[in-house]
Image: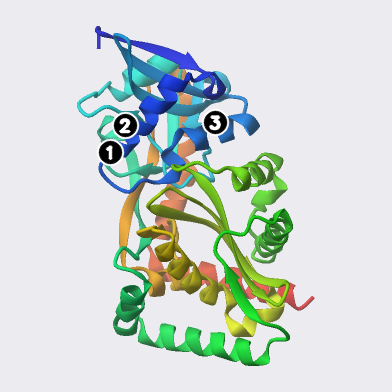
Amino acid sequence: MSAFRVRIVRPGELSEPEIEAWRELRAKADGPANPFMEPEFTRAVAEVRPRSRVAVWWEGDEPVGFFPYEKEPLGRGRAIGFGVSDSQGAVLRSGLRPGARALLRACGLAVWEFDNLEDGQPVFEGAAAESFGSPVIDVGEGYAAYEALLRVQSPKFLRTTLAKERKLGRQADGEVRFVFDERDPAALRTLMEWKSAQYRRTGRGDRFAKEWISTLVRRLHELRTPGCSGVLSVLYVGQRPIAAHFGLRSETVLSCWFPAYDPEFAKYSPGLVLHLRMAEGAAAAGIGMLDLGRGDAEYKDALKTGEVTVYEGAVVRPGVLGALHWLRREPPLRVHRFVRTRPALAARGRAVLNGLARLRGHR
């Protein structure tokens, strides 16, 4: 690594040549062009997370690598947008392999935590504690081909969802219509209100109660770049939104993020109808893949055509601070791992949460 120099900057301080180099490296990378890995996402996070930084590797007068991260007190580092980002890691020229601990040392970090490390990150090989399948929908051959596959793979799901869509069309007080890329901020506010209510009903932490997340989503909704753009998809009855989803897209990937619907229309399964129309709209927009994100859900199993792999774990440098971070992080991870590796226990837990949600919904 003696021929290289590393520059640590705030994301907003990246020069135009550096940003272009980042984009070019991502364009040459193997695997899906996930928008969370683009410089625009890192810069948007930095506007609401002031401890965001980027390590830039230079070889001579050429930037050849980028490592975005958030630096907290006592040398604790996290992936950029940790907790909401669905794809994380370093962006490096092929063949550039700084050691993981050397990378942390250059950044002044004792530990770096990740929860959605993308596949194909050799620098962090061996640091993952767990791997997860992130379901994806392949619409590269067009929506008709995808629906034909569903008729074979998930026939009951497709038949029931399409029947409910037709029933909604007959019974709704107004025209049922779908907008793939809705720019109205009022529709985004409605989605965020639905999602907050859903979090509370199911006993989960309300992400939108965190100002940095709600501000980030609003700003990303306004972002329009080839590699990373906010996409709000809405299912309407007349002028009334009944289901919506906000995610990020590149030219070829739609990364699904925040779906929700109006509980008054629950009997029509508007969220499922929305996802079918999203797949159709994405295919029409030239997108080849929808990434549904890690996490178990029946609707994902019904919709998916395959999976990509993401990883959770941490790189820890030897020393007192690294040991303290390990002790803080490891016990709760072991509990979560214990539950996740026992499907029956995990299923009972989900059933309890769903039961609580139904009780709260009737209050």
Label 2 Cα neighbours within 10 Å, binned few <14 / some 14-19 / many ≥20:
some
Res. 29 mark: 1
Which quadrant of the figure has residue 279? Answer: bottom left
The image shows residue 167 at horizontal and vertical percentages of 59, 91
Circle 2: element type? helix
In percent of the image, x 55 and y 85: which residue is there? 165
In percent of the image, x 57 and y 35: which residue is there? 45
Q: What distance separates the C-alpha of mark 1 from that of mark 3?
A: 20 Å
Q: What distance separates the C-alpha of mark 3 from that of mark 2?
A: 17 Å
Circle 3: element type? helix
Q: Dots 1 and 2: beta carbons under 8 Å?
A: yes
Q: Residue furthest right?
A: 363
- Three-letter code, disc 3: Arg
Which quadrant of the figure has residue 172? Answer: bottom right
Label 3 Cα neighbours within 10 Å, binned few <14 / some 14-19 / many ≥20:
many
- Three-letter code, disc 1: Ala
The image shows residue 300 at horizontal and vertical percentages of 43, 68
Which quadrant of the figure has residue 187? Answer: bottom right
Mark 2, residue position? 25
Q: Do we see residue 320 in this rendering?
A: yes
Q: Do we see residue 319 in this rendering?
A: no
The image shows residue 122 at horizontal and vertical percentages of 25, 34
- Three-letter code, disc 2: Leu
Q: Is residue 319 left or right of residue 193?
A: left
How is the rendered protein coloured? rainbow
Q: In the image, is residue 362 above or below residue 252? A: below
Identify the mark nearer the N-term, 3 or 2: 2
Q: In the image, is residue 362 above or below residue 17? A: below
Mark 3, residue position? 43
